[in-house]
Image (cartoon, rainbow, N blue to C red):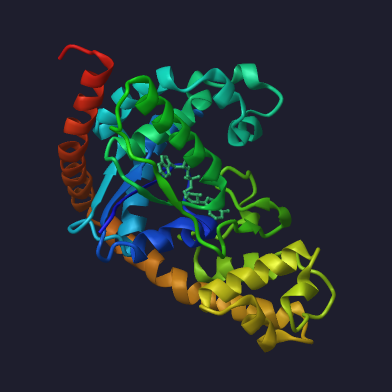
């Protein structure tokens, strides 16, 4: 088996993009591998978080991940700030990564927008902390959506420079596990934007805690077009919203896009939308209801996080201590 690491920011409620691009694969990959899943509260802090909300969201997201099928007994589930090895290794990586590398990060440019100077310094070095998350465990397999690809490339640049500068082979190269379908689920109201927790309008995303009628409504009001559906994938070219809806449907039904289109060829979007709402509810309702049950016993969630942090520390501590020794820190 491999050592797997991945993280999610405890800001807002996970949405269909998080689920199809990442969480679903986190669940599948558990079999036969050692998985470490992290609520990255330190990453969340790179933009302002109300402290009460931050605490609440870590608890809520932990419950959602367990409800979605992460096994906290067999695997490791914890919040980042509870294991100090992350911050210590991130500092070393801040000193390995070059400012020029940071300046190339498209996610920083997108998030900071025109007013770069007003953002936190943490947002700028965000990818170095992410590299530390993975490498504090020497994890080699990282299941993420497409938007994290550049950050993983940066992690490998850090590995290469660290190993070169200190004449070692201490850190391994990391490998992204990026799904071939639904690695980039788009906004329901605008097929050119990715579905995102930070979008001010909730109409563009389906959240894992949405009630059935909310799901039906969001899908009903999702942007589509007035053309009937084609019988083959190439007929969707340039139809961003249509492509997004069919993609979501096909991955949730375990079908290819062409197979999904065979069901709908010649029909309009009302048929597709009904079928899509049905399959979404079928997947999301059990997660939502199980989450509610888990949240009724918050002591249990706190125990999961505490035990997760202990197990995580036991792995990360010796690795990060050795990295500190390599760079010349006296302990
Ligand atoms: P975050 O919290 O933005 O998203 C969590 C996971 O969901 C994926 N994702 C999507 N996939 C498909 N379509 C979308 N519209 C979509 N939106 C989000 C993300 O790719 C991600 O896999 N930097 C990370 C968290 C992180 C991390 C790590 C991940 C911190 N340290 C170490 C892996 C390894 C983030 O902000 O994810």
Report whether 25 appears left or right of 153: left
* Horizontal and vertical percent position of residue 161: 42, 26
Q: Tag count in the figure?
A: 0
Q: Quadrant of the N terminus?
A: bottom left
**Residue 75 point in image, percent of width and height:** 23, 55
In which image quadrant can residue 113 be found? Answer: top right
Q: Is residue 200 left or right of residue 163?
A: right
State the residue in front, 139 or 212.
Answer: 139
**In this view, which residue lies farthest toward the right?**
226
- Give 118 or 28, whichever is nearer the viewer: 28
- Is residue 129 in view? no
Residue 81, image x and y in percent?
30, 32
Residue 142 vs 292, above or below: the answer is above
Name the side, left or right, on which 251 lies relative to 227. left
When the figure is inspected, residue 133 is found, relative to residue 303, above or below; the finding is above
In this rendering, the answer to whether 256 lies above or below 61 is: below
Q: Residue at x 24, y 33 (%)?
A: 83
Residue 299, position in %: x, y? 19, 49
Of 139 and 182, which appears nearest the observer? 139
Residue 220 visible in the displayed image: yes
Which residue is at 75% across, 86% downward?
A: 265
Corner quadrant of residue 171: top left
Position of the C terminus by quadrant: top left
Which quadrant of the figure has residue 276?
bottom right
Q: Which residue is rendered at x = 47% and y = 41% of the image?
A: 152
Q: Which one is in front, 310 or 95? A: 95
């Amino acid at each position: 088996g491999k050592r797997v690491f991945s993280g999610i920011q405890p800001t807002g409620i996970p949405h269909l993009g998080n689920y199809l691009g990442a969480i679903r694969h986190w669940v599948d990959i558990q079999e036969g591998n050692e998985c470490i899943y992290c609520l990255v509260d330190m990453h969340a802090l790179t933009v302002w978080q109300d402290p009460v909300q931050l605490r609440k969201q870590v608890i809520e997201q932990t419950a959602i991940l367990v409800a979605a099928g992460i096994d906290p007994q067999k695997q490791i589930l914890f919040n980042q700030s509870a294991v100090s090895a992350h911050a210590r290794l991130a500092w070393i990586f801040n000193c390995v990564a070059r400012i020029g590398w940071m300046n190339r990060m498209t996610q920083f440019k997108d998030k900071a927008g025109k007013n770069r100077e007003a953002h936190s310094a943490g947002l700028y070095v965000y990818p170095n902390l992410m590299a530390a998350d993975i490498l504090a465990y020497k994890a080699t397999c990282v299941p993420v959506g497409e938007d994290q690809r550049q950050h993983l490339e940066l992690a490998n640049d850090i590995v290469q420079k660290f190993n070169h500068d200190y004449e070692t082979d201490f850190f391994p190269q990391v490998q992204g596990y990026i799904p071939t379908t639904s690695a980039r689920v788009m906004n329901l109201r605008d097929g050119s934007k990715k579905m995102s927790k930070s979008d001010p309008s909730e109409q563009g995303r389906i959240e894992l805690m949405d009630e059935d009628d909310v799901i039906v409504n969001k899908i009903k009001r999702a942007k589509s077009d007035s053309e009937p559906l084609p019988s083959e994938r190439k007929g969707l070219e340039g139809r961003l919203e249509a492509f997004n809806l069919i993609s979501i449907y096909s991955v949730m039904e375990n079908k290819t896009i062409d197979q999904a289109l065979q069901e709908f060829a010649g029909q309009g979007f009302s048929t597709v939308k009904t079928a899509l709402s049905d399959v979404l509810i079928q997947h999301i309702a059990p997660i939502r209801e199980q989450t509610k049950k888990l949240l009724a016993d918050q002591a249990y969630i706190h125990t999961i996080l505490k035990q997760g942090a202990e197990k995580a520390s036991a792995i990360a501590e010796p690795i990060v201590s050795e990295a500190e020794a390599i760079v010349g820190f006296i302990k």
